[in-house]
Image (cartoon, rainbow, N blue to C red):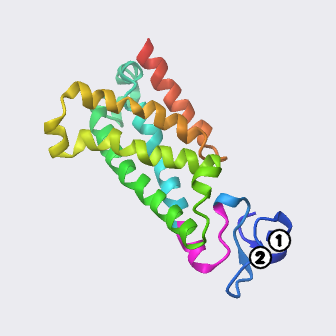
Amino acid sequence: GFMMTSAQIAEVGIASGCEGGLERCICPRVTICATDTLSIILLALARCSAFFDYPLYMMMFLSKCHNINNVCRRTVLREWIDFGDMHKVHRLFGIIVGIETMFHSFFHMLRWGLNADNHLLWITTTGISGLAAVMITPLICWPMVVPAIKERLAFEVRKGLHYLSIVWAITLLFHSTSMIYYLIGIPALMYLVDYLF
């Protein structure tokens, strides 16, 4: 459940119940357990940033499906979508996701740190995959958008680092129990098939 009573949380067995006089709080699983007001606010900020990014994740992969985009250019969809320059979409969404990934991670790690739950970073699948994703993200984004890095690295190196996006997508498939398998898995698979054929 979304907002649970102290009795319901005690039944789950992760925490003893809501704190600070709250009648309801959130604790369906250990990685998203928020039993006080500050934890609920930090969890909301972290989760909203991830939910905001889901369509962007999809479009980052779909915008690079050149064969599919070429087919779409010859359909009526071209009246509403400019398939001719999807790189602008990819670049803009990549910058936003690069920022939002840090935002998302910061608020989860701050919440875990304040609640003395830092160990969740290395003992849970969510923590390990999130830590891997947040470490890979700068390697994917920064060489493409930060002028000082872009000037110092050859294009081939930057492009090679950019292919870490496949590893990044795989880590995200393990990060959440939500619809992320479909929201990232299908577009990433479409990108791979498009790239290979």
What residue appears at the point 50 percent right and 67 percent down from the top-left corner? 110
In the displayed orientation, state which residue is furthest to the top.
197
Nearer to me, 49 or 73: 49
What residue appears at the point 44 percent right and 48 percent down from the top-left corner? 134
In terms of secondary structure, what is the magenta stretch mainly? helix
Crowd band around label 1 with a 10 angstrom C-alpha radius: few (<14), some (14–19), many (20+): some
CA distance for labels 2 and 1? 5 Å
Asked which quadrant contains residue 149, the reply is top left
Give the magenta range: 32-44
What residue appears at the point 67 percent right and 65 percent down from the top-left corner? 33
Question: SS of the residue at dot 1?
Answer: helix
> Does the segment drawn in magenta span residue 149?
no
Q: Amino acid at mark 1?
A: Ala
Residue indicated by mark 1: 10
Q: Is residue 54 visible?
A: no
Asked which quadrant contains residue 68, the reply is top left
Q: Is residue 138 visible?
A: yes
Q: Is residue 26 above or below residue 72?
A: below
Question: SS of the residue at dot 2?
Answer: loop
What residue appears at the point 72 percent right and 59 percent down from the top-left corner? 29
Nearer to me, 153 or 37: 153
Residue indicated by mark 2: 17
In the displayed orientation, state which residue is furthest to the bottom.
21
Residue 74 lies, in percent from the top left, at 36, 20
Q: Amino acid at mark 2?
A: Gly
Quadrant where the C terminus is found in the figure: top left
Do callouts 2 and 1 mark residues in contact (Cβ within 8 Å)? yes
Crowd band around label 2 with a 10 angstrom C-alpha radius: few (<14), some (14–19), many (20+): many
Number of residue marks: 2
User: Position of 24 compared to 175: left or right?
Assistant: right
